[in-house]
Structures are given as C-alpha cells and as structure tokens.
Image (cartoon, coloured by chain):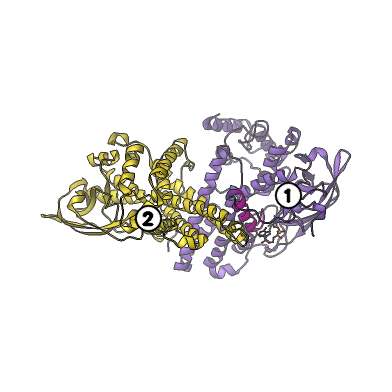
Chain colours: A purple, B yellow
C-alpha cells in the first residue's frame, strides 16, 4: 500500500463511520481497520506500513473532527507497554491488551522503581512467587505516574533471589484492580500528585499475564526503557512544537523585557531545539527504515531534558514579575491529574515539572553512562554486585 | 516563524555511502597527516596531487553542476558527503572554495568557465575575505579605464586557483569578473588554518571577463556564500567526528591509576555529551545539505541553523580532543591541532556562529 492508498483508506473509513458518533465505537473500529498505529501488524491495529505515515493518518482524522484516543492520558501504555507487548507478548496477550490500550479504555502505568531500586533497577525486591497457574506478588513500588487512573501496569518483579540480580527478574502485566493493589498519592514539587506509591500485597497475577520467559525480565525491561526514552525524548515533529514554542511566544509577546543577554540565550536555545527536532526526525527516519530503538534514544532524552529545563528557566526570566506568580487555578492545591503534562498550565509549573525530566525514565547521569558504554564502547562502571546472588547483595 | 513544509531525507543513500567510501579510500591512500602539518612549515606540495586525484578519479568538481552545463548532475547531498570526508582528514584541497562557493556563484549565469570548473580543468576562488558570510556587506573593487584595481585580504582558495571571481562595483550592484590568477599579485598569509591557507590579493589595472552581470552579481555571491555555509557544516561535522572517534579510541587504551582512563565517569560523561552533540550536528548538517539540494524554501533557515550549531560543535570537539589527550594533545606531532585550527577557522569563516544566529533572529521572528 502506498501513501495515497492509505489516505484513501482513511477517507473510506470516515465515509463508513460517523466521527460524531460514539467515540469508543469509533476508536475500536479505527483499530480494527488497522488505522490506529499503521506500523503495527495487520490485526493489531496496524497495516505493516512505515511508522512515519501515521502522522498523515492522524492529521486526516483530526481534520474530520474525529475523536482521538487522548494519547496524553496514556503515555506509558502507548509509548512503553504497547511496543513491549508487541515484541514479547503471545498472540493471546496481544489480542487481550492492545485494542483497549490503544482506544484509551484501559490506561497503563509502570511499576518499575522501588525505594531501594531506582537507577539500579535490576535490584528490585518485589517478589513474585509461583502459585499453581499464577503468581503471588508482594512488594512496594514508588514514583508510579498515573497509577491512580490505571487498569494495568507493566511490572518487574523478582522471581529468583538465588541468582545475580539481572537474571532473577520476570516481567508481568499487573491488574491494578486486584484488591491487593493499594495506590497512595505522592505529592510533588508542583503541588500536585502525578505519581504515587503502590503497595502490592498478595496480588494475584495469572501466568498468562507473564511477558517473556521466567527470568528474562531484564531483557524485556530494557526494551521498554529504550522505548520510554524515545517516547519522552522524541515526539515533536513541528518546528517550535513543545517548550521552545511556548518560550519563543513569550519572547514575542514581551518586547519590553528584551535584553541582549536574554536574546542570546533565546537564540541559542532556539537553535538547539530546532537541531534536536531534526535529530529526532533523523532517528524517526532510521526507525521507519527498520532500525530498532536502541541507546540512541538515550541521547535524544538527554537533550530533551536539558532543553526543557533551560527553556522553562529562561521563560520565567523573560516574564520577569509575572514569572514570580504561580497564577494557575487551582494554584498549589493538591490534585491528582489525569495526564502527565510537561508543557501545560503555567510558566512556574513548567519550570518545576521540567526538573523531573532529567530523573524520570533514567537520570541524565545514567543515560550518559548508557551512551558512553553502549554507543562509544567505553569501560563499564564498576559493578561490584554483578555476579553476586541477589539475596547476598549488601543492603 | 516559518514552518518547514517538506520532510527532507536526513539519512545517507546507498549512493552517498559509496561516494563516501571512495573518497575515504583515496584520502587514506594519498594523504598523510604529516603532509597536512608540513603546510605549516611552508611545504604545500601535498595539495595539488590530491586535488587532481579527487577531481580526475572521483569527479568531485562537478557534483553541484547540472549535466547540461558539463557537470555530474549530482547534488549538494553528495557534495556534503565529500566535505565530511575532507573535514575528517583536514584535507588541504580547494573543494569548498572552488567546487562549492565559486561554482554556485557561476551557476547564476552558466557559461564555459562553469563547465571547466566542473570538469576539473580549472580551479576558481571567490575574491572575498573568507570571513564574509551570506548576511554581510559585500565588498567590491572599482573598475576604470585601466581595469580593476584594489586589494582584497584573507581570501581562501586563491593559492590553489587559476581564476579568481572578483566582485566589481557596477551600475546597480556587483558584477562578477573572472580574472586570471596570473594577473593578480597573490601573497600567502601565515594563517590560523594552513590546511586552507589564505592569501591577500592586489589587483592593479587588471582586465577580467564578466561572468555574472551587475543585475545578478550580488545575489549570485550571496547564494554562493549561503551554499558554502550550508555545506561547510558537513566539513565541520567531519572534523567533529574525527575528534570524537580519535579521542574515544585513545581513552580506551591510555592507562593511569591502574585502569583505562576512559573508564573514569567524569570522562565518560564528557564524551557522551560530545557524542550527543555530534549526532545532533549530523542532523543539522544533513538538513542543510538536503535543503540546498532540494532548493527547499527553508534553506535560508537550514543553512544558518547548521552554521550556528555545527561551527561550535566542531570547535568544542577539537578542544575536548586536545584536553582529553593530555600532553600529547598539545604536541605538533599529534594531529589534533590540525583539527582545532580548521575548526576554529571554520567557525569564523563564511560568518561567525553569532552572525548566523543574528540572521536567524530575523528569519524566525525572534527580534532582539
Ligand atoms: C516525575 C517522575 C515520574 C516517574 N514516573 C515513574 C513511573 O511511572 N514508574 C516508575 O517505575 N518510575 C518512575 N519514576 C522513577 C524514576 O525512574 C527514578 O526516580 C529514577 O530511575 C532514579 O532513581 P532514584 O530516584 O532511586 O534515584 P537514585 O538512583 O538513587 O539516584 C540518585 C542520584 O545518583 C545518581 N546516580 C545513580 N547511579 C549512578 C551511577 N551509576 N553513575 C552516576 N550517577 C548515578 C543519579 O543520577 C541521581 O542523580 C519517576 C520519576 C519522576 C521524577
């Protein structure tokens, strides 16, 4: 199928399905027609077409006023869980999870980090123990974005404490509706609670919800993390999309605040942002040509985090007095948002939220290690506990 | 702010990869780093044979010229790949000055000289200080009954050229005269970058042939300088890539404190940051080359963006290469200094990084 045929397919679909009708029915039909994510296989919401063509499809649907799947409310589902399920899931798992994930009927979250396992994710202590045709899970997760809205989670748990940490992990889909799952809000520096603590007490997971082999969780998690870094750091396709556009507009709106020093920073950050956009396009073209997301995503994410932080800081200085005021409704009051939003709300919110960009999805320090070791081939960090059974690791 | 309209291909085609490997093989066989360094001590003998080989064996001189004007009918994308390789070996050849800048100037009114440049039979240079960029005031010489007279300083590519493209003030603008190099006093300058040595030109009543008329001359020169800026980004990319690769390789071998120094996290993080910048520079340089090749309306932004970004990355890469090599990086014997000199000179050539940012301020509506 070429691009014109694809466009025609979308138009035919719109002829047969009323965009003003029931949104869920419309989205399910769109998935079944292979127009959800065209680079996915046929029968899984796609048509085996180049990833880059998706933008065309989305644009036609948007122009027709069709409902979208509110991608911002399900970033972890779309950006991380879906590609992982596609790569490691059985056909049954793909049938069960992918459609409601894509339509937004089921929101996903990521149960990876723990109090004792952040950068050193392979150290997770949450235990999953075999019980008949299922697993019983106990442990504590932390920093879980959007857990309060999620139907499912991707979960990394320890199934064999007797082997070194990377080898004893298994990757599961965890139903967040299980009575053993308790989600408590964690308030962050913006005043709201986008992330949570999640306590898992005798949570039952059927073995059919295991992704990949027992003990192969690290490999599966690595694929998820590579996708996560692309999801966080990639994205923007239009010039001045994202943070740079907001700050450039602030610059344009406030001629009275212009100084040579701010101008120089504005221009440098505009240049860096536009080059980052092109770097993302280039990575996108490589993926479209068949490359797998690899450590290059880490490079994109490093740049993204730096720019988001520098730009949002510059914005406050451009705004001057206004930059001292956290004017949003409802201000600092605690709330639990339904989405992860890097650029929404107000300038002060953006400045504060951007601080998380160099921590979430792998800290910038860890990403530099990843680039140095996996791309440049420099020696690894000393790994004192690499060959030690997990249960004997110093804590 | 203008939105780019086309999704230009930022990867390398198979053809471009083939061209790269031919150029790389030729350079590896015919150019010793020591020969580049020798230029600093007055021995420029490496330049001519290398330039002849690139012209005759690979045909690099005609890349930007359409077939109907005697060229190879390739595009700026291929020229960019050649420049990456020339940058990677700081090759002392007048490709940028003749096959890109002078050639683009002549493309305004194609004639016999253009065909001769394309065929590699002659080599030209634009008689303009190398620091002049596409947004600068363009100097021109005066002409009277006796011919063209005046002085032009710091011209790149003049020492290798047999013909000089001299901008001459004429009614309604600048006319471009082709002047035989043998009619001009050409004094070599002891330059920061001797792998692209500059020269001062003195013309005393010289006759030239008008190759671009007064109506089109200024625009032709600006286009030549813009093409130069767009494609020099690829040369800067090549310089930066060499610096990164060489430094990473060295730090994997060099041992201190009982371990390979490339294992120290302070250095790993610096190299990771440099890698990110070099990857980004690749996208910026590719975008400029693709925009130039396609005649894309976004070329004015693409070229200045590439210069604003790649110019600084090349300098940083060279500075990091020297620092991270320690004492050996400071020596004449190690080639790192050749890259620093090329990178710093390139950052100033065809408009500084700052001049390109200033031009962007207007182009993308971010006024100061
Ligand atoms: C806004 C936000 C949302 C998040 N959402 C989720 C989520 O939905 N699901 C989830 O599972 N997790 C989530 N996280 C958690 C995130 O992945 C972790 O915070 C992160 O991996 C760092 O772990 P840590 O907090 O334990 O810090 P640590 O690992 O304790 O790091 C402390 C400091 O040490 C540095 N450091 C650690 N190891 C090294 C090393 N080897 N070399 C150099 N420096 C090192 C780190 O860079 C950091 O600066 C989120 C975090 C944030 C901020």
**Does the residue tagged 2 have its C-beta within 8 Å of any atom of ligand 1?**
no
Verify whether residue A367 appears in magenta. Answer: yes
Which quadrant is home to the C terminus of chain B?
bottom left
The spot of residue A247 in percent (x, y) is: 53, 59
Instruction: Tell whether B151 sits left or right of B270.
Output: left
**Circle 1 sits on which residue?**
A110
Q: Chain of mark 2?
A: B
Verify whether residue B229 appears in magenta. Answer: no
Kind of element beneath mark 2: helix
| Residue nearest the observer in this picture, A335 or A211 | A211
**Circle 2 sits on which residue?**
B37
Examine the image and state in which quarter residue A133 appears.
top right
Instruction: Tell whether A377 sits left or right of A84.
Output: left
Q: What span is in magenta?
A: A356-374
| Residue nearest the observer in this picture, B200 or A387 | A387
Kind of element beneath mark 1: strand
Q: Which mark is residue A341?
A: none
């Amino acid at each position: 199928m070429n691009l014109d045929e694809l466009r025609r397919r979308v138009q035919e679909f719109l002829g047969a399905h009323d965009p003003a009708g029931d949104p869920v029915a419309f989205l399910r039909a769109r998935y079944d027609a292979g127009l959800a994510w065209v680079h996915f296989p046929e029968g899984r919401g796609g048509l085996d077409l180049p990833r880059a063509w998706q933008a065309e499809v989305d644009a036609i649907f948007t122009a027709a006023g069709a409902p979208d799947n509110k991608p911002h409310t399900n970033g972890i589902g779309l950006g991380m869980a879906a590609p992982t399920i596609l790569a490691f899931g059985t056909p049954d798992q793909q049938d069960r999870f992918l459609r409601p994930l894509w339509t937004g009927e089921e929101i996903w979250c990521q149960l990876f980090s723990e109090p004792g396992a952040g950068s050193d994710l392979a150290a997770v202590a949450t235990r999953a123990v075999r019980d008949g045709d299922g697993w019983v899970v106990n442990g504590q997760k932390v920093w879980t974005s959007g857990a309060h809205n999620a139907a499912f989670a991707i979960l990394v748990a320890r199934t064999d404490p007797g082997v070194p940490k990377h080898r004893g992990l298994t990757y599961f889909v965890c139903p967040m509706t299980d009575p053993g799952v308790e989600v408590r809000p964690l308030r962050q520096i913006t005043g709201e609670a986008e992330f949570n603590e999640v306590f898992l007490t005798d949570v039952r997971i059927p073995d059919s919800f295991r992704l990949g082999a027992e003990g192969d969780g690290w490999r599966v998690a690595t694929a998820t993390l590579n996708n996560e870094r692309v999801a966080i750091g990639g994205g923007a396709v239009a010039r001045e999309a994202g943070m740079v556009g907001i700050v450039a507009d602030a610059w344009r709106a406030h001629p009275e605040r212009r100084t040579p020093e701010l101008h120089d920073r504005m221009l440098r950050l505009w240049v860096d942002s536009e080059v980052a956009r092109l770097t993302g396009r280039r990575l996108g073209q490589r993926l479209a040509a068949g490359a797998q997301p690899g450590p290059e995503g880490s490079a994109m994410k490093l740049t993204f985090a730096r720019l988001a932080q520098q730009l949002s800081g510059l914005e406050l200085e451009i705004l001057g007095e206004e930059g001292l005021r956290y004017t949003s409704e409802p201000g600092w009051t605690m709330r639990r948002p339904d989405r992860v939003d890097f650029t929404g709300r107000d300038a002060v919110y953006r400045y504060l939220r951007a601080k998380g960009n160099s921590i979430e999805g792998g800290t910038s320090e860890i990403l530099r290690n990843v680039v140095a070791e996996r791309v440049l081939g420099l020696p690894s960090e000393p790994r004192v506990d690499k060959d030690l059974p997990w249960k004997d690791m110093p804590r | 702010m203008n939105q780019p309209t086309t999704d230009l291909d930022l990867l390398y085609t198979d053809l471009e990869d083939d061209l790269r490997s031919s150029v790389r093989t030729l350079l590896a066989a015919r150019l010793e780093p020591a020969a580049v360094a020798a230029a600093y001590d007055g021995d420029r003998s490496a330049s001519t044979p290398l330039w002849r080989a690139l012209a005759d064996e690979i045909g690099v001189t005609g890349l930007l010229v359409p077939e109907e004007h005697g060229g190879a009918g390739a595009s700026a994308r291929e020229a960019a790949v050649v420049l990456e390789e020339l940058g990677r070996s700081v090759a002392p050849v007048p490709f940028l000055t003749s096959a890109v800048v002078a050639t683009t100037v002549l493309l305004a009114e194609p004639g016999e000289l253009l065909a001769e440049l394309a065929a590699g039979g002659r080599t030209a240079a634009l008689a303009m200080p190398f620091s002049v960029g596409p947004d600068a005031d363009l100097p021109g010489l005066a002409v009277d009954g006796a011919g063209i007279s005046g002085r032009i300083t710091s011209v790149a590519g003049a020492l290798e050229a047999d013909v000089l493209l001299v901008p001459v003030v004429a009614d309604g603008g600048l006319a471009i005269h082709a002047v035989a190099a043998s009619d001009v006093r050409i004094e070599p300058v002891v330059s920061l970058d001797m792998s692209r040595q500059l020269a001062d030109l003195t013309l005393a009543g010289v006759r030239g042939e008008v190759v671009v008329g007064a109506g089109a001359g200024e625009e032709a020169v600006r286009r030549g300088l813009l093409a130069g800026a767009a494609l020099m980004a690829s040369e800067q990319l090549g310089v930066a890539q060499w610096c990164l690769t060489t430094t990473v390789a060295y730090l994997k071998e060099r041992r201190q404190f009982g371990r390979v120094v490339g294992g120290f996290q302070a250095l790993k993080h610096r190299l990771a940051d440099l890698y990110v910048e070099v990857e980004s520079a690749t996208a910026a340089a590719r975008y400029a080359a693709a925009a130039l090749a396609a005649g894309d309306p976004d070329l004015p932004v693409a070229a200045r963006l590439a210069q604003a970004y790649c110019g600084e990355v090349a300098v940083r890469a060279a500075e990091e290469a020297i620092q991270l090599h320690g004492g050996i990086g400071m020596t004449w014997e190690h080639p790192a200094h050749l890259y620093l000199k090329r990178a710093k000179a390139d950052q100033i050539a065809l408009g500084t990084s700052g001049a390109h940012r200033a031009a962007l301020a207007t182009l993308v509506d971010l006024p100061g």
